[in-house]
Image: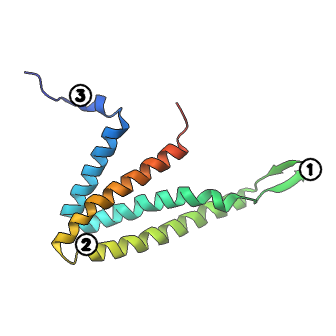
Amino acid sequence: MSGYSYKDFKHELKNVGFVLLVLWVVLSAIGLVYPVAWSFLFAIMLGFVIFDATFGLFLKRRKVPISGSQRFQPSGYRFLAFASGIVIASLISATFAEGIAGFLTQQSANRLLTLPTSFVLCALLYVDFRLTDEPP
């Protein structure tokens, strides 16, 4: 008898489309069963995407000339940009998540909105991954 095995699943994990589908199914299932937990996951994942999108903005033009055209970036600036990006991304994503959690828990039917929202979140994570991923 030939069925779908763990080795088949492990092989499928090499396909990014399959991984996105699995992530979407897991997030959607959590959203349908436990929307408050889903809102925390949403906040963390969205915060990660926002941080990645904004971190570079904080570092631009924060280089100090040494001599001639050589420039360096003091570690204080990098850490300030890093910490600021985390704070801003966390505040934005937590605000979204709080509003979404409140809406999702008002009525059971509202939980269905976690399906398309999870899809959009997975798409954002994938785009972020593709933009920051270095080729093997």
Circle nearer the N terminus (2, 1): 1
In the image, 130: left or right of 122?
right
Instruction: State the separation of the CA atoms marked 3 and 1.
Output: 58 Å
Residue 8, label in figure: 3
Disc 2 and disc 1 in contact, CB within 8 angstroms: no
Numbered marks: total:
3
Disc 3 and disc 1 in contact, CB within 8 angstroms: no
In front: label 3 or label 1: 3
**Residue located at (53% from left, 60% from top):** 51
Which amino acid lies under the numbered mark 1 shown in the image of this protein? Ser
**Residue located at (36% from left, 32% from top):** 14
Residue 104, label in figure: 2
Q: Nearer the viewer, residue 48 or 82?
A: 48
**Residue located at (33% from left, 41% from top):** 19
Circle nearer the N terminus (2, 3): 3
In the image, 33: left or right of 62?
left
Instruction: State the separation of the CA atoms marked 2 and 3.
Output: 36 Å
Which amino acid lies under the numbered mark 2 shown in the image of this protein? Leu
Q: Can you give x and y, in whole percent of width and height, for residue 111 in the image?
A: 21, 67
Q: Furthest-right residue in view? A: 68
Scheme of image coloration: rainbow
Callout 2 crowding tier (Cα within 10 Å): few <14, some 14–19, many ≥20: many
Q: Is residue 77 above or below residue 126?
A: below
| Quadrant, the N terminus | top left
Instruction: State the separation of the CA atoms marked 2 and 1.
Output: 57 Å
Which amino acid lies under the numbered mark 3 shown in the image of this protein? Asp
Q: Can you give x and y, in whole percent of width and height, for residue 41 in the image?
A: 35, 60
Q: Furthest-top residue in view? A: 1
Residue 67, label in figure: 1
Disc 1, SS? strand
Disc 2, SS? helix
In the image, 55: left or right of 126?
right
